[in-house]
Structure formats: C-alpha cells, structure tokens
Image (cartoon, rainbow, N blue to C red):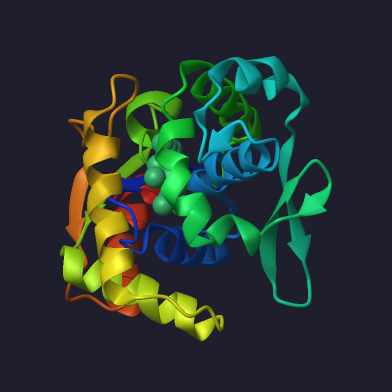
Amino acid sequence: MEKRLIIAIDGYSSCGKSTFARSIAKELNYIFIDSGAMYRAVTLYCMRKNFIGKGGLNTGGVLWEIKDINIGFIYNPDINEYETFLNSENVETEIRSIEVSAHVSRISQIPEVRARMVELQRQIGVNKGIVMDGRDIGTVVFPDADIKIFMTASVDIRAKRRHDEMTGRGIVIDFEEIKRNIIARDIADENRDISPLRRADDAIILDNSRKTVEEQMSWIRQIIEKKINGS
Ligand code: DC
C-alpha cells in the first residue's frame, strides 16, 4: 500500500495556505483540515456568549465552556468541499467575517483553547493521509510531519487576495481595513507566548507572491513524489 503522509502547511494569514492545502489533499485523496477555521469557530462561539467583544475578554467564561465547544468538518457534496460545524451548526460563512477575524488572535492565545484544538487536530490526523494548514502544525501539532511547508507572501498581495475573496462573496469591505487586520494578526501570531508562528527548522519556505496555485502544485508534486517513492 502507498505510504500515507502528514503534510503541514504553516505561514502568515491570507497567504493562500488553505487553497494550497486543499488542492494537495484533493490530488492525493487526503483529508484537508483548515486549523484556523477551528480557532475561528471557537471565537464565534465566544462572541455569541459575549465572552469577547466590546467589554474585552472574559477568559473565565471561555475556560468554563471550552468542553462544550465541538468542532467538526462535514463534506458538502454540492460544492465538493468540507465545511466547518460548531456544535452541529454550519458556520463556514460566519467564521470568515471581519468581526471574527478581529477577535480570533485573542482567543487563539488562550493556552487551554490551544490545548483543546491541538488534541482534536491530532485525533483527526491519527491515520495520516492528511494535509493541515495553520500556524503551529509543523512545530507543535505534528512535529514529525513528513513534509513541512512555511508559506509567506507580501502584505499587499495577501490583502488583495482576501479583499477579492470577500467581495466575491458579496461582502463590502475596505481594502485598508483588511490590510490593517492582516498586519495586526502577523504581529499577534509571531509574538504570542504560546506556540508563536515560526518556521520549523525542517520546513521548506514557499513565497507565493508571484506563483499561481498550479505553479505551487507542480513544485510540491516533486517533493511528495520523493517522500512517497524515496526517489
Ligand atoms: O488561518 P486563519 O487566518 O483563518 O486563522 C485564524 C486565526 O487563528 C489566526 O489569526 C491565528 C489563529 N491560528 C492559530 O493560532 N493557530 C493555528 N494553527 C491556526 C490559526
């Protein structure tokens, strides 16, 4: 039987990590997990309970309810994609809102939230054959991953991609606001105490500022081929 791999894709926000990870998973017939969606779903839950918002952060509330937060991914055959579910509710669209983006860094800094997400992520990856994207996949979640990629791209290109994606979904949003949010999240991701965003020593850097998804795919195919066949 062909060797099944764990592929970890980490990097800055809005670098196209999920698009890339999803394409790899489709090609290999692997599970794809967008770990950022899990932190976004927890954030949405906390916003609804007013644990985070204008009144600041109520960490005690988050900790009290963390065990009640269940996150899963369910395949939608109509769009041929997995969608994010929070306690049985499809939240795929809502977790992408700018409000969730504005609060997710605070929530993802809570150690107990991270511990719970890492536990769930490892459970999902137990049989290998998985491509997971995030910030700490190659460093913390799967330090023994077969392939680790660290993605980066210029801030302007990332802001433009996210802007196009949101306007494409009918959301009216200012480009500069998106750019500010991306810069703020880079700073938060790189400087948090627990599992900060950093390249694993054995991760390969991919700057996709000027690369199409197809170019990225031809690049990774060779790396995967070597890992599977050892050639
Ligand atoms: O990939 P994304 O932008 O959807 O992720 C949303 C937030 O979740 C991001 O600001 C940082 C956090 N995150 C994290 O801390 N660890 C991960 N493995 C994935 C995301």
Across and down, in percent, residue 109 comes to 41, 27
Left or right placement of residue 107 versus residue 224 in this view: right
Left or right placement of residue 31 versus residue 80 in this view: left
Between 64 and 136, the one nearer to me in the picture? 64
Quarter location, residue 216:
bottom left
Between 6 and 59, the one nearer to me in the picture? 59
Across and down, in percent, residue 28 comes to 54, 60
Q: Residue at x 43, y 29 (%)?
A: 142
Residue lying farthest to the front in this orientation: 55
Q: How many numbered marks does the figure carry?
A: 0
One can see residue 15 in this view: yes
Q: Residue at x 31, y 42 (%)?
A: 148
Across and down, in percent, residue 40 comes to 55, 46
Is 95 situated above or below 192?
below
One can see residue 6 in this view: no
Between 33 and 183, the one nearer to me in the picture? 183
Between 73 and 3, the one nearer to me in the picture? 73
Q: Quadrant of ligand 1?
A: top left
Quarter of the figure that contains the N terminus: top right
Q: Residue at x 68, y 60 (%)?
A: 82
Across and down, in percent, residue 20 comes to 40, 64
Quarter location, residue 59:
top right
Left or right placement of residue 103 versus residue 148 in this view: right
Is 134 situated above or below 52?
below
Q: Residue at x 64, y 36 (%)?
A: 50
